[in-house]
Amino acid sequence: MKRAFWIVLGTLIVIVIAFVATYQARPQVFAPHFFEAVDRLDGGTKVAFFGDQGYGEDAQAVLRLVKAEKVDLVLHLGDFEYLDRPDLWREQIAGVLGDDVPYLALLGNHEEAQWEGYKAEVNDLMGKIEGLECEGDIAVDISCHFKNIHFVLSTTGLLSEKIGDARNLSHVKFVKDHFASSTDDWRVCGWHKNQHKMQMGSKGDEVGWDIYEACREEGAMIATGHEHSYSRTYLLSDMSEHTVATTTSPFVFKEGVAMAFVSGIGGKSVRPQGQATGAWWDSVYTSLNNAKPGALFCTFGSTTDPKKGKCEFKNIAAETIDSFEIVSGY
């Protein structure tokens, strides 16, 4: 009788130990894989947009946010670590995201002092992006195809360029020439600087309206940095006059209408709102809103429709500040 009792007790103890061990192992071994799969069952191409990064904890927190979002591509909208140290900028990225992350970057005004050094680092990063096909020069104008998106990126307004001069207008021609035969589902224009009415700070007109209008005519989303805040327009039918085409999400991008945004709180600092909010702005996030650094995440396409997507601005506190749906109507 005693022998049977101890056999039963021993068996129960073994079962309990096995159950506890399995239970403890599940969240550590199985859960992360499961949630990674669930997080990206959207079927689209997810891009992180941010600029004005800086060097230090806030910048690294934004990179950790980008990593957590499991993006397919980063588009850094100019102004890197602000120290004229291309090596430090690259080390900061690699320290959080690894050295083979799909990382595409525009040069900004804070790269001008070490232009060639930053250009070399950006080109090296571009060479690591599987499936990226580009034509042009990242330090002037470049046209890139990645998955289902056509990017046309520019250094307009940099290196002492003046509005309306030959070099300034050459960027406009590049945009028109390269979008003219575009067959991708989505179109994105990108550069660093802004026009005064296309940001919420106190910066003046620095690139001219011609390039905004060229991208709007092609129906391309316009991504900029430079001002240290986040702001996004409605869908506009005229950029220079700030004419609103629609205020309702989902926003349908097609020839003649587009929206512009500034995603300039990548970690350097957050600035206050320096002018009144115009009727063309849908979302404004500055230090007056106690804004925290973050990035805009856009998923272009989905499992059910390659021409439907969604964008969200998230900060490093995991708060969603802005959210809207997008449709490709080319």
Image (tube, helix red, strand yellow):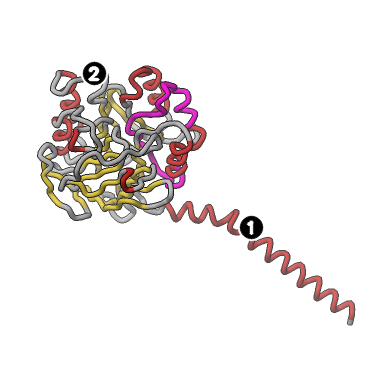
- The outermost residue toward the right is 2
Q: Secondary structure at mark 1?
A: helix
Figure check: 326 above or below 146: below
Q: Can residue 330 be spotted in the picture?
A: no
> Camera-side residue: 302 or 152?
152
Q: Position of residue 22 (x, y in %)?
A: 65, 61
Look at 22% across and 49% down and name the residue there. 282
Residue drawn where x is 39% and y is 47% of the image: 315
Distance in Å between CA atoms under marks 2 and 1 = 59 Å
Tell me the kind of residue under disc 1: Ala
Q: Residue 70 in magenta?
A: yes
* Disc number placed over residue 294 in the picture, else none: none
Q: Is residue 240 visible?
A: yes
As rendered, which of 47 and 161 lies closer to the eye? 161
For the residue carrying disc 2, how many other residues have a C-alpha within 10 Å: few (<14), some (14-19), or many (20+)?
Answer: few
Mark 2 and mark 1 residues within 8 Å of each other at the beta carbon: no
Tell me: residue 56, above or below residue 281.
Answer: above
Q: Amino acid at mark 2?
A: Ser
Q: Is residue 159 above or below residue 226?
A: above
Q: How many marks?
A: 2
Residue 254 or residue 280, whichever sits in front: 280
Residue 142 figure quarter: top left
Q: Position of residue 274 (x, y in %)?
A: 24, 39
Span shown in magenta: 67-93
Q: Residue at x 21, y 20 (%)?
A: 161
Residue 236 within the segment the image draws in magenta: no
Image quadrant where residue 63 sits:
top left
Residue 278 coordinates in the image, percent (x, y): 16, 45
| Residue behind mark 1 | 25
Q: Nearer the viewer, mark 2 or mark 1?
A: 2
Horizontally, residue 325 falls left or right of residue 240, namely right
Residue 160 disc label: 2
